[in-house]
Image (cartoon, rainbow, N blue to C red):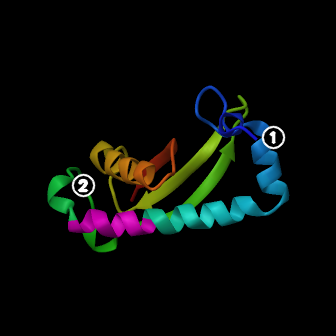
Amino acid sequence: MNENDLFDDNGRLATWVKMKLESQGYLEKILLKLKAETEKICADAVKDKGEIGGAVNWADLHCHWSEFYRDSEGDSGFRVYIEESAPYNVELQKYISDKLNEAGFINIEIITEW
């Protein structure tokens, strides 16, 4: 199997890969690993808070959940929900996205909310 076969032209998982992941229970394992990695990154963000702007409750910043989504337009992907930060906190979202990319999780949507 060629690595490029796993992703479509937009860097998203190919449909056949998603179906296989779902049918074999791997999707849940990926989501748990994504949440755990994001939780670790939130802890790192607290240490780096001087470098990150926007309104954040640093005392309780955490990843509430991760999910795989598929919308009515056929788009799909992964997202994580970060609690205790202002919605649209672009600086925190970029920090988390960059760290997830470094950990091998690409094209993850970051949602911040109170």
What secondary structure characterizes most of the magenta part? helix
- Secondary-structure class at tag 2: loop
**Amino acid at the residue labelled 2:** Ala
Name the residue: 60% across, 67% down. Answer: 32
Point out which mark residue 4 bears.
none
Q: Which residues are magenta?
A: 39-47
Q: Residue furthest front?
A: 1
Q: Residue furthest left?
A: 50
- Secondary-structure class at tag 1: helix
Q: State the quadrant of the N terminus.
A: top right
Q: Is residue 57 visible?
A: no
Q: Is residue 76 visible?
A: yes
Please rate how many residues cluster around mark 2, counting C-alpha atoms within 10 Å: few if below 14, some from 14 to 19, many from 20: some
**Amino acid at the residue labelled 1:** Trp
Is residue 109 rendered to the left or right of residue 62?
right
Please rate how many residues cluster around mark 1, counting C-alpha atoms within 10 Å: few if below 14, some from 14 to 19, many from 20: few
The residue that mark 2 highlights is 55
The residue that mark 1 highlights is 16
Q: Residue 5: give x, y in percent of width and height.
A: 71, 35
Q: Residue 74: give x, y in percent of width and height.
A: 73, 31
Q: State the quadrant of the C terminus.
A: bottom left
Could you give the CA–CA distance between mark 2 and mark 1, rounded to whole angstroms? Answer: 40 Å
Name the residue: 36% across, 63% down. Answer: 84
Sequence-wise, which precedes: disc 2 or disc 1?
1
Task: Specify whether residue 70 is painted magenta.
Answer: no
Displayed quadrant of residue 25: bottom right
Viewer-nearest of labels 2 and 1? Answer: 1
Q: Residue 96: give x, y in percent of width and height.
A: 37, 53
